[in-house]
Image (cartoon, rainbow, N blue to C red):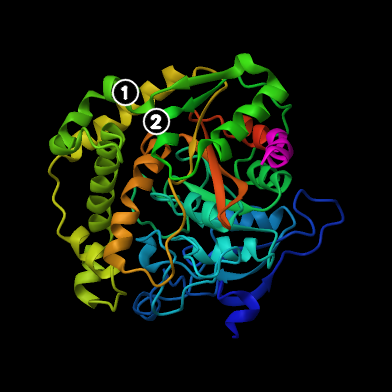
Amino acid sequence: MVKSLDYGAFMEKFSLQLSPSQHQLPLSGLTFAVKDIFDIEGYVTGFGNPDWARTHSAATSTAPAVMDLLMAGATCLGKTVMDEMAYCMYGVNKHYGTPTNPCVPDRVPGGSSSGSAVAVAAKLVDFSLGTDTGASVRVPASYCGILGFRPSLSAVSTVGVLPMSQSYDTVVSHLGWFARDPMILNRIGRVLLHLPDVDPIKPSQIIIAEDCFRLSTIPSDRTAQVLVKSIEKLFGAQCVKHVILGDHVKDKVPSLQHFMDKGNEDQEDDIPSLAALSRAMRLLQRYEFKNYHAKWVTKVNPDFGPGISERIWDAIKATGENIDFCHSVRTELRAALTALLGDHGILALPTTPGEPPKVQANPATSDIFFSRPFSLLSVAGSSGFCQVSIPLGRYDNVPLAISLVAKHGSDAFLLNLVETLYDTLQENV
């Protein structure tokens, strides 16, 4: 397969569709691809690693989420490249290659749903499926300049999807999807979430997380102010509110004290409470990854790429210390954000705080580079709220994005809002 023709997005290509219907279906005529973490009958689910593929048999059934899309009239064109065992957010894979970011070829596409994002950004398919454990849909969507949606916790069936961790993974809790068109993004949501068409609801408030935008290296007039201008035009200035999110979380999530870095609370390049939230989230992910995969990793001793290998073996050594506090953090955070947003409120923050790293960046440097994004991404990641990443053009020739977060169960409301907002946002970029 020539990488230049498909940007290295696909693991394998095929055409899978159900018998044509005599009736017009919601996704008729649309094509999609799926991350190589979803079961498709007759194909080995490779999990981004050749040793995993070698030691596992072909799937005997197709994941219900994929079946829902096929039954809605869409055609699946193949499986896409992913980071090994979904345990990275760079989009790099030493075995199958790093999919080329169509927007900025010298930058990583973001992972772990790298190939799925690239397939959509390169217009190889109309939409695609990924998973989002820590950020694996939202980051690639941001870096590749497309829409990425992470639904509410447990909103979509994740049967037939390999788990990375039980509490956070799209597999067990969050399945995500990519699209270029907000109408298609919404239609996919109706199918996967089994939702009827409902009329859009005006947001009661859109809260700008001021400290989160200050964390970003991108000037706020290219991100937050674009959103504010669009909201004021569509819904009026009274909808716009402001919050110092880090202070709110610190006050309302007392269990975070167990994860605070006491020597880092005054640094300007961090939000201490959100950094603590990120540490709690990653600790729980490591612990649950160990519970799922330690037996296979220790038995097979698979060949992992640089960076990935260290992270996976660190996870295998994880202990249960502070795990109970991780669960308390999630409960407290969900209550705190539910109270902050109220009914039909939206929280706005950057998807990531800066541009994607160069493809050849040192893995150790990349780890430092990605510590700040996790502070932002853990807000929805830990609370189980739904989040959408929306492209906002480019800055210094690199794609920009902004994220909107809505409370758990508000997926239809958020998808409708994106469709309503999208064109006005692009006009104000």
Q: Nearer the viewer, residue 345 or 328?
A: 345
Disc 1: which residue: 247
In this view, 223 is above or below 306: above
Q: Is residue 132 left or right of residue 31?
A: left
Q: Looking at the picture, which amino acid does disc 2 mark?
A: Asp
Tell me the distance, in whole angstroms, between the alpha carbons under discs 2 and 1. 9 Å
Q: Which mark is residue 211?
A: 2
Residue 263, image x, y percentages = 13, 38
Residue 417, image x, y percentages = 66, 32
In this view, 370 is above or below 10: above
Q: Looking at the picture, which amino acid does disc 1 mark?
A: Asp
Q: Confirm whether residue 295 shows in the render.
A: yes
Are the two marked residues, 2 and 1, in contact with CB atoms closer than 8 angstroms?
Answer: yes
Q: Is residue 159 left or right of residue 419?
A: left
Residue 421 belongs to magenta span: yes
Pointer 1 local density, CA inside 10 Å: few below 14, some 14–19, many at least 20: some
Q: Is residue 353 left or right of residue 289?
A: right
Count of residue discs: 2
**Which image quadrant for residue 195?**
top right
Q: Nearer the viewer, residue 94 or 128?
A: 94
Label 1's element?
helix
Q: Main secondary structure of the magenta part?
A: helix
Question: Residue at 53% across / 44% down in the picture?
Answer: 156
Q: Confirm whether residue 204 shows in the render.
A: no
